Image: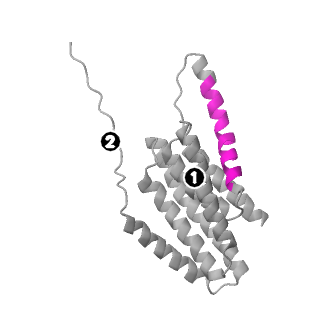
Amino acid sequence: MQTETQVAPERPSTRSWPWWGYLAVLAVTFAASAALTAPLSADLGVTLGGWALIAVYAVYGAFLTRHDLRTRRLPNALTLPLATVLTGIVLGLGASTGDWTQAIAAMIGGAGFMVVLSLVGFAGQVGFGDVKLALSVGIVTGWFGMFLPVWAVVLAYVLALPHAITAVVMRSRGRDITDLPFGPYLIAAGAIVAVTAAIAG
């Protein structure tokens, strides 16, 4: 009896960047952020900078969402560039406005969120692509408040809850349902929290 071999579909190439690639992106985004906001008042620079963070995060986040839904993977080559760009923007804003409070809060928020999700990842509840993504989510929400990343992760689980409940019910009836990756929920939650905070001022 002959058996047919199933060939797995090819995944798009996602080679990791060299360290100097990240450094170059960081330098360029830092310079651009500082130069564009330097002519503005400190308050206006902080406000526009916050919306620029959200815009970059939203556009790139849409790309990451599409990739995660298609491949169920968020490789370093896709998640870390976003974190690098957001870091460059935040540091540039701190340098141009002279107010480092929000920049420091964003960095702490990003690092703290990544550590928390790392612990969840070691427990097998999320993938480590989501852990790297948490750095960006923490930066964009932390810019508006050091503890806002906490609300982002809570909201991400709330957004994912309906699908999780549906999956449990379907499987209890013997029907299969595809697990959705957690990355899109994280990205959406980060955007919602950041936009809400920006509007609230």
Residue, disc 1: 114
What secondary structure is the magenta-colored segment mainly?
A: helix
The foreground one among 106 and 45 is 106
**Residue 192: % across, % down:** 68, 54
**Closer to the N terminus: mark 1 or mark 2?**
2
> Disc 1 residue type?
Met
Which numbered mark, 1 or 2, is in the foreground of this view?
Answer: 1
Asked if residue 92 can be seen in this view, the reply is yes
* Residue identifier under label 2: 10
Which circle marks residue 186 in the picture? none
The image shows residue 118, relative to residue 2, as above or below, that is: below
Q: Which residue lies furthest to the left in this view?
A: 1
Q: Is residue 156 magenta?
A: yes
Furthest-top residue in view?
1
Q: What residue span does the magenta drawing correspond to?
A: 149-168
Residue at the image position 62 percent from the left and 55 percent from the top:
112
Q: Where 123 falls versus 28 (above or below)?
A: above
Q: Where is residue 95 in the image (x, y as percent from the top left)?
A: 60, 80
Residue at 56% of width from left, 71% of height from top? 89
Question: Few, some or many C-alpha atoms within 10 Å of disc 1 (few <14, some 14-19, many ≥20)?
Answer: many
Specify the quadrant that holds the N terminus.
Answer: top left
Give the residue at x 66% y 35%.
161
